Image (cartoon, helix red, strand yellow):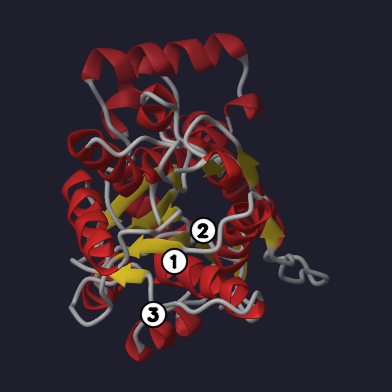
């Protein structure tokens, strides 16, 4: 900063003002300072600045995976919402492991983020305690817990599962199954399991059993997972009429396996997924699914954080209520009334 001030012919305080609040400095002075910064390739020390301001201008986002396009869209929406206020994202991914989430939270808190955004609402005891004591805004996303740690932006995965089951029942299907992953390993898809819980609750209310709900393989699900679990289900119930997969990725694998086996979809079997992935729209036939606006989750999270970070020092500050972005059932070519099956 001393070198910049000397080259620009201004005080170090003026340089500081240009960096912190450029509107306080005249345009001509501001231009001289910025030109000097460019000539010297000067990068402001944000960490040093945060010692006095207690702001680091970065937000931690902890996601299950970076290969899922929906989570990537959420990160993009969050980044776009925070960018005008000069916040940057520092992203960690857990691969659906709660112990890894705990490790990432501990490592991120050591870097003093201004807020933490974490996918999911179930955490280890230690992770919960760290976030509760962090003294910064915490936003849990991709679900709507009854009692969030601080804030929440998402939708009810349980209600998603119920909506899927109600759709298949409305089509007249009675032999109904579902495809999900196991919960006995280190990697657990807790949101997918919540969708299965909602799905099976409707089946029981309709007087049907849940013996055709297949949990196989570990999270995250894949195309191979869909093909494998479909095969297991068909061995158990060759007369199954309709299937809900906890992800479009798994649904695509199941659809490809149906093609290989000569099973007509939806002529012999109705199939639906979750997520509205691009590939689900491009399959033949296109897959019936539950659409989530993943980018909106990120955008709404960013908007909430900007409000919280601006108001958190105000005497009348109170945490915002959970934001429910909802979901939409999208009917396409892989589901049909039971009368048209078999």
What residue does disc 2 label?
A: 142
Circle 1 crowding by C-alpha within 10 Å: few under 14, some 14–19, many from 20: some
Q: Quadrant of the C terminus?
A: top left
Q: Earlier in the sequence, mark 1 or mark 3?
A: 3
**Left-right relation of 233 to 245:** left
Q: In the image, residue 205 lies at what x, y percent? A: 66, 79
**Left-right relation of 6 to 334:** left
Q: CA distance from mark 1 to mark 3?
A: 12 Å
The answer to whether residue 78 is visible is: yes
Residue shown at 60% from the left, 36% from the top = 331
Q: In the image, residue 305 lies at what x, y percent? A: 60, 53
Q: CA distance from mark 2 to mark 3?
A: 14 Å
Q: Are marks 1 and 2 in contact (CB under 8 Å)?
A: yes
Q: In the image, residue 96 lies at what x, y percent? A: 27, 65
Q: Which mark is residue 225?
A: none
| Label 2 vs label 3, nearer the camera | 2
* Mark 2 residue element: loop
Q: Are marks 1 and 3 in contact (CB under 8 Å)?
A: no
| Label 1 vs label 2, nearer the camera | 1
Vertical placement of 59 versus 39: above or below? below
| Label 1 vs label 3, nearer the camera | 1
Residue shown at 61% from the left, 64% from the top = 162
Vertical placement of 168 versus 334: above or below? below
Vertical placement of 30 versus 258: above or below? above
What residue does disc 3 label?
A: 123
Residue shown at 26% from the left, 59% from the top = 234
What residue does disc 1 label?
A: 191
């Amino acid at each position: 900063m001393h070198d910049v001030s000397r080259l620009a012919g201004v005080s170090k305080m003026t340089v500081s003002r240009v960096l912190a609040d450029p509107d306080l400095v005249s345009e001509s002075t501001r231009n001289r300072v910025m030109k000097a910064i460019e000539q010297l390739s000067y990068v402001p020390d944000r960490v040093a600045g945060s010692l006095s301001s207690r702001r680091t201008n970065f937000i931690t986002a902890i996601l299950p995976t970076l290969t899922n396009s929906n989570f990537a869209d959420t990160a993009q929406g969050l980044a776009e919402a925070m960018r005008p206020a000069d916040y940057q994202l520092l992203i960690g991914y857990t691969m659906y492991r709660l112990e890894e989430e705990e490790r990432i939270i501990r490592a991120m808190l050591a870097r003093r983020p201004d807020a933490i955004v974490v996918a999911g609402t179930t955490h280890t005891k230690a992770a919960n305690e760290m976030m509760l004591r962090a003294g910064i805004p915490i936003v849990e996303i991709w679900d709507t817990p009854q009692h969030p740690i601080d804030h929440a932006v998402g939708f009810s995965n349980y209600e998603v599962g119920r909506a899927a089951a109600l759709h298949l029942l409305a089509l007249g299907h009675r032999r109904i199954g579902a495809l999900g992953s196991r919960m006995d390993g280190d990697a657990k898809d807790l949101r997918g399991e919540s969708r299965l819980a909602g799905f099976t609750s409707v089946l029981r209310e309709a007087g049907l059993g849940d013996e055709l709900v297949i949990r196989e393989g570990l999270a995250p699900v894949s195309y191979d997972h869909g093909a494998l679990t479909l095969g297991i289900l068909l061995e158990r119930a060759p007369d199954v009429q309709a299937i809900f997969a906890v992800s479009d990725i798994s649904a695509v694998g199941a659809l490809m396996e149906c093609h290989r086996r000569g099973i007509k979809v939806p002529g012999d079997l109705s199939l639906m997924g979750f997520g509205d992935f691009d590939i689900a729209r491009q399959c033949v036939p296109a897959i019936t699914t539950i659409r989530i606006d993943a980018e909106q989750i990120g955008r709404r999270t960013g908007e909430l954080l900007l409000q919280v970070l601006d108001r958190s020092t105000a005497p009348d500050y109170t945490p915002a209520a959970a934001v429910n972005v909802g979901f939409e059932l999208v009917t396409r070519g892989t589901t049909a009334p039971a009368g048209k099956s078999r």
